[in-house]
Image: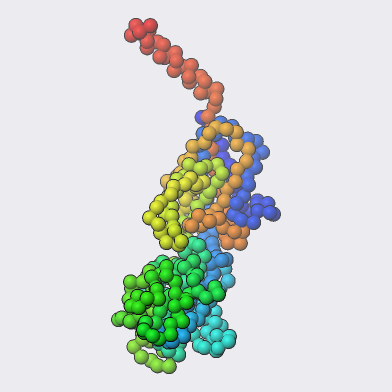
Amino acid sequence: MGYEYVSVDSMNRRAHERTSRILVQLSEPIQHATSVEVVSFSTANEFFNVFEGYNTMHFEVYSPFVVSPENRSVFLTVDPGLYTGAELVAALNARALVAAVHPTTGTNVTISFSLDETGRVAIKVSTPSASRRVVIYQAGKNYNKSIPYRLGFSRTQTVRTNLQGGGVNGAIPNLIRNTFTPGAPTPIAEYLDPRVGSTTEPNSYIEESPHAGGYDPPRLPYEVWNTIDSTQNGPLATHPVVGANILFEAHPFVVLRSSLVNDFTKTLLEEDDGHPSGRCSTTQDSVLCKVNIDRNLYSWIHYESHINQAMVHQLSGKPLSSFWVELADSNGEAFNGHEFKDYQLILKFETADPHAARNEAVVKAYVEQLFLEKVRCV
């Protein structure tokens, strides 16, 4: 057996290769390759942590305790990029100042973010009335790439965006209903979304009685909290909503994938209409290597197979003349060209000499023949 090494540098990508994927074309094919592994990998820990398509934070502010309930949508959009925790909080606060005043009604909805010494983010929403309720919507299909997730808010603290629907003329439905009064007009019924447990029947509304801490009963599949009355400094002013986890800046790991391999098995939890179904599916993936990130932002990441447990993949032995390699985030999605710094890696291919294999087979057959003759089996 022997070894061949291939060096790959993403700086050598062609002009049309706009993601982290690079096509490697060998000047001479590698013959009889039986396995491959990554022996070295280096890149800068400057991966984007706010991605395009996931760079908007969506709030809904409801007024459920009036005859004609209404809701106010607030969208805070920041530029995709790499942020420290303090920079992301500052960027959201800057956008919140712009989005505070409704362009038509002039109604003030003041949203502010703060980062405490433990690393948790608190969100305070102030309106002219403390009777309003606030929910956070998820953005995009992958919650783990969203801004609420980056800030430390869990799935149970947010509403999935694809729960929208059922409203009048495509409007975002009110997920909260005012107390039902028999005989009173209930235009809110047109906006109710039955998938979150609300109906138009008496005594079947979502309970809105506030409890200690300024939140609503935690039996909902998402978190609802009270706004703070901007005209007073009462007890509610001390109860913003706080993320369940600490804010984190860096990816926990990145993944190298390649067309060379498909022997990595991945199990996924399937979902029905945005909700976990309890079913799991198993698929094959092309994961070449997982690189854990234990460095601060703006530091170099180095992976060495003699230090880390290498993933060795078996190959078929067919001639290799080309293959692709790409760098993906911790969600398994390849980085776009501006979301990462260039990376370098070295691949080690183990090869088998076909002549040596044939000679080994001849020697083995001869030894077996001698053994059978010695014990008089032939």
Residue 147 lies left or right of residue 208; in this view the side is right
Q: Compare residues 123 and 161 and report the one nearer the observer.
A: 161
Please, which residue is most extreme toward the front here? Answer: 183
Please, which residue is most extreme toward the left here? Answer: 212
Residue 294 at least partly seen: no
- Residue 205, x across and y down, in percent: 36, 77
Residue 355 at least partly seen: yes
97 over 242 or under it: above or below: below
Please, which residue is most extreme toward the right here? Answer: 15
Residue 43 falls in image quadrant? bottom right
335 over 157 or under it: above or below: above
Q: Residue at x 63, y 35 (%)?
A: 29
Q: Residue at x 45, y 62 (%)?
A: 274
- Residue 272, x across and y down, in percent: 44, 58
Residue 159 falls in image quadrant? bottom left
Instruction: Name the image colouring.
Output: rainbow
Residue 28 lies left or right of residue 251; in this view the side is right
Q: Residue at x 41, y 11 (%)?
A: 369
Q: Compare residues 219 and 307 and report the one nearer the observer.
A: 219
Please, which residue is most extreme toward the bottom here? Answer: 231
Q: Residue at x 37, y 10 (%)?
A: 372
